[in-house]
Amino acid sequence: VGIDAYSWLHRGAYSCSMEICQRDPKTKGSELTCMKFFMNRLNMLRYNNVIPVVVFDGGRLPLKSATEKGRQRKRDANLEQARIKLSEGDVTGAIELFQGAIKITPFIAYELIQILKAEGVEYIVAPYEADSQLAYLSMLDPEKGGLAAVISEDSDLLAYGCNVVIYKMDQFGVGKEVVLDRAFNCTDVSAGRLTFKCFTQELFTGMCVLAGCDYLASITGIGIRRSHSLVSQHKNLEEVLYALQLTKKHQIPEGYINSFKEANAVFHHARVYDPNMRCLSFLRPVREGFIDAFEGNLDFLGPELPSLVVIAIAEGKMDPISMEDFDEYSRVPSQGHGVLSTNKRVASQKHSRGLLTGSDSSPFVSFSQKEKDNISFRTGEKILQKLKHTAYKNQ
């Protein structure tokens, strides 16, 4: 089961917002409350024989730059106000503002990865969006490391085409499951419900983009219900866009049609990491003429990256935003434990609690030969045996 790492880190960070925003450089990542929150949830899954695959966000997509800048401005403003409140002695007011200033950085993700490595948990850092990476992994066959479901708080996963998503999961593993296949075949037309009986994934994604997303703001007056109505009526995205241009009811911004096509393309063909081939790939294969339709420039899907950079990011060794090696400036020394490999995870499912045992069974985490040389075989064997027989409790 895939885990949207940043969604859990954000949830855990609300209880230690002041701690994160005013963090002492000497504070170890393992001491942060959000890390403990994350590992408690993770251990609950492992105790119930669920094999978690943790996926982290990577670099920024060009189409999301405006959204990111807007969010950063809000965080900066909240942080400034929080410090003022704190100086005035209003701790409660300061904490509320600190919660709005939280930013999970790549370095916090790096610190969590060190914990995951020590615990033998599978992970991967996406080249760009974790949502598209999770959707890609969910589309893979089980024998190639495919995911049965994804745990997240982000509805974008549905627009990307992730079939099974579990939202609002609590500490007991109870959450709300959304299955796209069921939605597309549901005939329930109860009052107030939107029906997707005649929808395809393409139409559903187009509806989401039209209603507004991180890559494109919606047209004034068009929300999810209006978008659903337009797509249901025309059943073709080109016709929906044509109809919008004809009507005088909605003021269409200049360049909106091209921006819509780019945003829609991201949800279908965003660049992701293929852990089996260890290279960049598209979320879905691009059809003939796709590249020409965008004049040969597909950087909006996520710019191309050198193979070594892609692998270093995926392994959690390089900051996906600054492109600097973590070992060059991090406060945490590199332990050199976990790296990605092209091996299959299927065999690992037979292991106790779904833990890795250092066998060649996963496309995500294993030990490289160079790193094996850094520890004795006996020491490694003892560590792995302990992991196999540990009874994980919900703390």
Image (cartoon, helix red, strand yellow):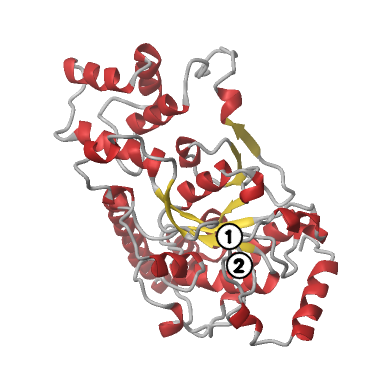
Query: Pointer 1: what residue?
Result: 12
Residue at (53% x, 53% y) in the render: 7
Mark-to-mark CA distance, 2 and 1: 7 Å
Comparing labels 2 and 1, the label whose residue is closer to the camera? 2
Left or right of residue 155: residue 31: right
Q: Earlier in the sequence, mark 2 or mark 1?
A: 1
Q: Residue 51: horizontal and vertical position, in percent?
A: 71, 54
Q: Amino acid at mark 1?
A: Gly
Q: Is residue 223 above or below residue 273?
A: above
Q: Secondary structure at mark 2?
A: helix
Left or right of residue 70: residue 40: right
User: Which of the 4 quarters of the picture holds residue 182?
Assistant: top right
Q: Nearer the viewer, residue 84 or 282?
A: 282
Query: Pointer 2: what residue?
Result: 35
Q: Is residue 109 visible?
A: yes
Q: Is residue 391 above or below residue 11?
A: below
Total of numbered circles in the picture?
Answer: 2
Residue at (14% x, 34% y) in the render: 254
Q: Residues within 10 Å of mark 2 (few under 14, many from 20)?
A: many
Q: Residue 260: horizontal and vertical position, in percent?
A: 27, 34
